[in-house]
Amino acid sequence: MRIGELLVMNGVITEEQLDQALKEQTRHPKKLGGILTEFGFITERQLVEALEFQLGVPVVNLNETIFDLPTVQLIDESIARKYHLVPISCAGGKLKVAMIDPLNKEAIKAIQMATGMSVQPFIAMRIEMEEAINRYYGVDTTVETLNEIIQAGVYQQASGIHIEPHEDGLIVKYRIDSSLKNKKTLSKHMHETLFKRIKLLANLNASEERLPQNGRFQIKVDHKQLDIRVSTLPSVNGESLFLRLTDNSEPQLAISELEFSETNLQKFEKALGLPSGMILICGPEGSRKTSMLYSILTRLTNENHRIITIEDPIELRMPGITQVEVNEQLGLTFAHVLRSVLRQDPNVVMVSDIHDAETIEMAIRTTLTGRIVLGAIYGSSAVKTISRLMDMNKDSHLLSASLSCIVAQRWVRRICRQCAQSLPATEDEIKLFEAHAVLHSDDQKNGKGIIGNFRTLVSTQISGKLTVTRGTGCRVCNDTGYRGVVALQEVLLIDGKLRELITGQRPIQEIENHLVQIGYKTILYDGLLKVREGITTVEEVLKTID
């Protein structure tokens, strides 16, 4: 009898819980028992006891077991850590071995080759196994090193950690406020052990180094539950690794906290108030399009809405929402899931990546059935995104009927409040402000930004020159002058005239001319507005916007 059926039969889990775990197994092939414990449906103790009944292999409590030390030393530490096992005792050419997976033929063969004895396996809990290995073989320095790397990332509020192999060793870099910082160098011999440790945590193939892999694991740092996505990439110097850090304890930003300008916020709120339509968030890689979508979902989540998301991968698990992760290898594509989603009668559908003609076609069809479709799409501006949509979908009438709003987004570094200074603007900055009508803008918010310290503010005002704010660098911001990030946006509502232009497949220049006539504000305008408000700098805006 299979383990899932056994647990259901004995009332440990429900049929619904088993179905949910089996669906997860199709998306992420791994042992069903591990998935059931990850979801919290069963405890690890319940799992090993069920396995004992199913396999006829006895369970051993390692906390109460007396180990024969000479027997423990028969197995090398590398084998014990690789296969999660520890020998207990031996007699008559038979070796008793506690194992996480007693059916691991590769592990049993490795033990037999190392000792020349037959193996009698016992099942042990993972947490007891790790404690026993550390007790008899010593604490693994790899574990300590990994914990130090992740903790340093959390303390510096890093969004990601790069671990890159070089000829001299491993370079650890942290993504902090959109910038990359070299923070640590590890010896070359750490490469294999550290990467294998991370792969095991992320349920990846530890021996595969020729192909890219993706996985995830969770870890607690300072009582915070951290979700870590893992990506490996083969290179000439060996595998390179990237860890994406997500703090699940951090509340998702509300739309009001995304620092829209008043004009943009009013337009965006209008789009969200429509009963149906397609709202797209566009930007390049790293512009946090999915984060914006999650903020919208947080706003729309209530008992009157049935919300389904289609993601690759699921970056944040949200209560009250049905989240589906695509699996290209199984044919579970964005477009394929969208076809099935309509049978689930949703009010809102979120698609984390609209990247091909089939997906945009299905998204349009979903919208035209009276649903709200939220999507992320690659694009440098709202207008260029319209051009790309017209190229991907030849039925311009349906496209114009379904599209309601496009938001272009970027993130730039925020000036550090601790070392902010008020300084005279340069001639080039003044010309830029004048050219984009932000020198004396009605959209500017009083008190929104920072003005630097009092002494430099008074000094600059006495000079009679236009004031800008800069960070001079301090200990708080690691001498960068920046601390944190802020979003830049442009919000394009699709009005009647725009629908006519899209339906007629008019040139992009004609669409741009229409937007100029109605006073449309671009993302560059929004960036320069935030410079005038003392939130960021011209350098940051120009570096980020094409």
Image (cartoon, rainbow, N blue to C red):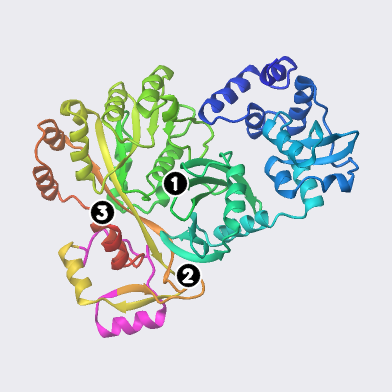
- Disc 2 packing (10 Å; few <14; some 14–19; many ≥20): some
Between 237 and 67, the one nearer to me in the picture: 237
Q: Is residue 545 left or right of residue 53?
A: left
Element type at mark 1:
loop
Q: Is residue 396 left or right of residue 260?
A: left
Q: Residue 545 lies in what quarter of the image?
A: bottom left
Between 196 and 330, the one nearer to me in the picture: 196
Which residue is tagged 3?
A: 523
Which residue is tagged 2?
A: 477
Rounded to the nearest angstrom, the CA distance separating label 2 from label 3 is 26 Å
Q: Position of residue 351 (x, y in %)?
A: 37, 33
Mark 2 or mark 1: name the one nearer the start of the chain: 1
Element type at mark 2:
loop
Residue 440 belongs to magenta span: yes
Q: Is residue 178 left or right of residue 120?
A: left
Q: Which residues are magenta?
A: 438-467
